[in-house]
Amino acid sequence: MNAALLYALAGVVLFAVGVAGLLALPHLLRKILAFNILGSGAFLVLVGLGQRDGVVDPVPQAMVLTGIVVAIAATALALALARHLYERTGRMQLPESRGAEPESRDD
């Protein structure tokens, strides 16, 4: 087993942990953290599969670097929205969407 395959397998495990966290955890900050773990797994898979015949392909590495920048921006936006939700509702959980009545706004 070479290092590239080990990176790819570790990335798949991280991706699965992130998906499980997104589905199982109700707290919004934990969902954001799970989303970051999921993204890290995807980046690790790309890095692991980017090596062919001992030579590293620069395209997957460039994609991963771009993805890291996008992930940081998405995390900052998610944290800002979570803070806004907390200030508005006092809770860090998303409202249930199944059968929930829309709240009337008295603004």
Image (tube, rainbow, N blue to C red):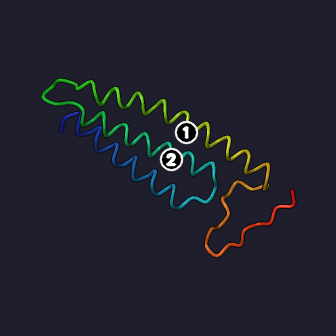
Mark 1 belongs to which amino acid? Ala
For the point 39% across and 48% down, the residue is 15
For the point 35% across and 37% down, the residue is 44
Q: Residues within 10 Å of mark 2 (few under 14, many from 20)?
A: many
Image quadrant occupied by the C terminus: bottom right
Marker disc for residue 74: 1
- Disc 1 on helix, strand or loop? helix
- Residue 64: x and y, percent? 37, 31
Taking depth in this image into account, of 31 and 88 the one nearest to the observer is 88
Taking depth in this image into account, of 31 and 9 the one nearest to the observer is 31
- Residue 59: x and y, percent? 28, 27
Contact, CB < 8 Å: mark 1 with mark 2?
yes
Question: Mark 2 = which residue?
Answer: 35
Mark 2 belongs to which amino acid? Phe
Image quadrant occupied by the N terminus: top left
In this rendering, would 53 be left or right of 62? left
Image quadrant where residue 99 sits: bottom right
- Disc 2 on helix, strand or loop? helix
For the point 57% across and 39% down, the residue is 75
Whichever of callouts 1 and 2 sits on the residue coming sooner in the sequence is: 2
Name the mark nearer the viewer: 1 or 2. Answer: 1
- Residue 14: x and y, percent? 40, 46
- Residue 37: x and y, percent? 47, 44
Q: CA distance from mark 1 to mark 2?
A: 10 Å
* Residue at the extreme bottom: 99
Q: Residues within 10 Å of mark 1 (few under 14, many from 20)?
A: some
Taking depth in this image into account, of 3 and 105 the one nearest to the observer is 105
Marker disc for residue 22: none
For the point 33% across and 43% down, the residue is 10
So how many labels did they put on this image? Answer: 2
* Residue at the extreme front: 107
In this rendering, would 42 be left or right of 2? right
